[in-house]
Amino acid sequence: MKKLLYLLRVDALGVLGINRLRHSADRAAKRKAGGALALAAFAGICVFGTALLYFYMMTSMFAALGMPELILGIAAVAGAVVTVITSVVSAPNILFSFRDFDQVLSLPIPVRTVAFSRLLKLALRNLLFLSIVLIPAGIAYGAHTAVDGGFVLRFVLLVLLAPLLPITVAAVLGTLIARVSSAFRRTNGVRIVLSLLFVLAVMALSFNMQPMIENFEEIGVQLAESLYGIYPPARWFTEAALGNGASLALFALVNVLPFAAFAWLAARFMRPLHALLTASGGKKREAGAVRAASMRHALFLREVRRYFASTIYVTNTAIGPILLLAAGIALQFVDMEGMMAEMGLAASALMAMMPYLAAWMLGMSTTTAASISLEGKGIDQLKVLPVSADAIFGAKLKLQFAITLPAQAIAATLFTIALHPTLKEAVVLYVLPAAFAVFSGLAGLWLNLLHPKFDWKSETEVVKQGLPMFVTVFGSMLLAGVPLVLTLIGAADATLIAAVATVLSAACSVLLWKQLSGKGARRFAAL
């Protein structure tokens, strides 16, 4: 147990520069680490508050239907789905392919302890996200019903158990995908395709709700059946929270037993799986003809190759544009105006939401927030190249724009065909998300320059859990959410709000580029 706690403590202290804050003799480094922690805490509080507001509004609606407990099932399903989606690619890297694998296993610590610590590390990191989903749902439920101390204790226990089954499923599937991919010559390419197909399949399943609701009074029952059909443990989660002892025991067993079984298997086969997943599959590639290219084009191609060399990098940043395109295609086959009318909502409400939803999807696809950190120990090789910092920044930004802007233009066209907006609305649909994508790319790059992390052991640490990525993704939700809320409550004309948001994004983008060209270049040289 002591050795397990030691390993977990080492991992925990490495998060967000806590070790540097505690032990560094450099005051500037300590201030930087402290600022990173404060920024992460602020972003976490903002996200928690947003989730609480969202769940409170949903619970009010379900309470009117006489089913406020439905919010607990929704939170359980949402948390499980997102945990599986976000962990299926990162799980094999954290468990079997981390950089200091040989050093850790050379310590006088049993392999089973190392394997269990890696699995607990994955579970604890996802517990943080699940807490931001489940705890606000529990608070919202408690605000609409009379709950006692027993509910609080049961709910805390359920939150602690909730990540175990999704993590186990993600780890098994992620390892299988990595194993299948390793048999092909283009290992990363196959793994990227398989991972994206899996993510899309899970999301398609999660949206497979009962499409026809004949009586409004039955919407709660039908929604509950759809939720519990997708993820049966959500039923046990809800019933256990309400005091059903049998459901609590069943939920605990369904989460703990698979987790324990996988932990045993991971310990038993840790070394063989590491060797298998880190070996290069297929035949060795032969050197091709040398091609000449301009300096800027060569830097851009370097970024593209680096991007597709990392499965976690692609799947974590390409999902936003892919979902945006999928939504545009789906709208061609769905009568959204009719569906909105059946729900008693104006079609204009959907049109007002679309630009901000697109902006959020593009904001969660920011590649630049990890691009500096991913250079790792090779950052010095990049710095000695006879190229300016502006050219390096430009190449990293071009990758961001190549991923987001074409997808946005195609999606906006599809939305325009499906929703028949006015000219002003169509302009907003094209311009606002594009301006937001440019701003998020510049902001991500600036944040990564302020808080780079070159001592990562797995790419997951910077692509999924790095402070710049965290702030960029969740900051995008907040920045897109504010004008959306102002629009929906009618604070001002929708077109005016959109114009202000677009202009502010463009102005901030100009200021950020000036900062990157000046202070950013000097900071890059000092890395």
Image (cartoon, grey):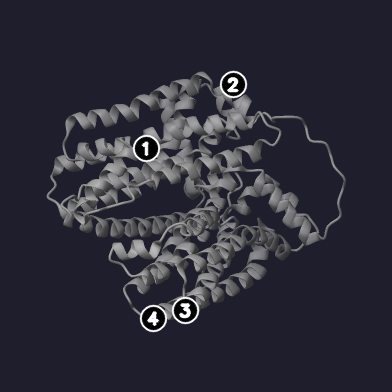
Numbered label attached to residue 208: none
Q: Mark 2 and mark 4: span between their CA atoms?
A: 62 Å
Marks 3 and 4, how far apart at CA? 11 Å
Residue type at mark 1 is: Pro
Q: Could you tell whether 440 is left or right of 233 in the image? A: right
Foreground disc of the pair 3, 4: 4
Q: In the shown orientation, is residue 85 left or right of residue 518?
A: left
**Residue 500 marker:** 3
Name the residue rendered at 59%, 28% in the picture: 179
- Please provide percent x and percent y for residue 295: 80, 60
> Which of 376/313 is in front?
313
Residue 510 screen position, x and y as percent: 60, 74
Q: Secondary structure at mark 4?
A: loop
Residue on which disc 1 sits? 163
Q: Of residues 64 and 384, which is closer to you in this image?
A: 64
Q: Earlier in the sequence, mark 2 or mark 1?
A: 1
Q: Are marks 1 and 3 in contact (CB under 8 Å)?
A: no
- Graded by Cα atoms within 10 Å as few (under 14), some (14 to 19) or many (20 or more), the crowding at tag 4 reads few
Cα distance, mark 2 to mark 1? 26 Å
Q: In the rendered image, which quarter is residue 176 located in?
A: top right
Dot 1 crowding, Cα within 10 Å, few <14, some 14–19, many 20+: many
Question: Outermost residue, top direction?
Answer: 268
- Sequence-wise, the earlier of marks 1 and 4 is 1
Q: Which mark is residue 493?
A: 4
Amino acid on which the number 2 mark rests in the picture: Pro
Residue 272, label in figure: 2
Q: Secondary structure at mark 3?
A: helix
Q: Residues within 10 Å of mark 3 (few under 14, many from 20)?
A: some
Name the N-terminal-most of marks 1 and 3. 1
Q: Are marks 2 and 1 in contact (CB under 8 Å)?
A: no
Quadrant containing the N terminus in the rendered view: top left
Q: Residues within 10 Å of mark 2 (few under 14, many from 20)?
A: few
